[in-house]
Amino acid sequence: MNTDFPRIITLLRKERNISQKQAAADLGVSQALLSHYEKGIRECGLEFLVKTADYYNVSCDYLLGRCAEPMGKPENASQNVPESGQDKLTAPQNMLINSEKLIFSLMNSLEDAALEKSVRGYLSLAVYRIFRVIYSANPKNDRRFFTVDSPGADGFTSAAMELKKAQTENAAKNGAMQNVQITTNSISEDHPEYASALLNQIKSCEDCVNTAMNSAEE
């Protein structure tokens, strides 16, 4: 049974503030049957899948969790093309960079200095941490490149990242972010140039996390 379909049709209905009773009537099924679909108790047929896709104006692939874009755009559809002289990045690399651009675009629109600073600090530490890993792969690279001693560097960097994460959570819950409702529609409408990147980045990361969780359970 597809586990993404129940989650996605429920999310779409709630994002659009449509009651289950109204959605069931519009889709030509009983509320009880729609409830079963949304809870994953029963699987729908192809006709209902297509009708639901038309109703919410999304693709069937999106409803089934096969793509992150509501309209089924490919992952690299909205990636920026490098200008002349710039390093040529792959689609997944651009996806990551544009996801960060969307986050900063959202931060800037809120004009919340504390939130922006903590988010920027967390991402900066992530770059620093992974660069140390890459740099340290070659034992010939001079360890004096960094001022923080190697033995405790990763642990203290991890601690610093957790602190920035806590500061971000505090700033988000007590600042302008608490009044911002984020939906797939708002992401696509407010940040059209980066929306595809973020949505696909989320899907990619959740696939990775689910794989790790399933491996841990085996």
Image (tube, helix red, strand yellow):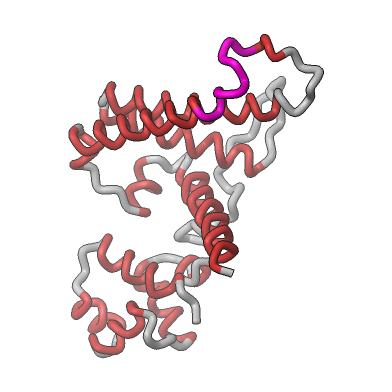
Residue 168 sits in quarter: top left
The residue under the point 35% across, 41% down is: 190
In this rendering, position of residue 170 left or right of residue 133: left
- Pick out the residue farthest to the right: 140
The percent coordinates of residue 178 (x first, y second) are: 20, 41
- Of residues 167 and 112, the one nearer the viewer is 167
The percent coordinates of residue 70 (x first, y second) are: 45, 60
Q: Main secondary structure of the magenta part?
A: helix
In this rendering, position of residue 206 left or right of residue 140: left
The number of discs equals: 0
In this rendering, position of residue 195 left or right of residue 23: right
For the C terminus, the image quarter is bottom right
Indicate yes or no whether the magenta region holds residue 24: no
The residue under the point 35% across, 68% down is: 56
- Pick out the residue farthest to the front: 151
Is 137 located above or below residue 194 in the figure? above
- Of residues 163 and 69, the one nearer the viewer is 163
Is 66 located above or below residue 195 in the figure? below
The residue under the point 63% across, 34% down is: 81
The percent coordinates of residue 207 (x first, y second) are: 55, 58
Span shown in magenta: 146-155
The percent coordinates of residue 187 (x first, y second) are: 37, 46
In this rendering, position of residue 2 left or right of residue 93: left
Residue 148 sits in quarter: top right
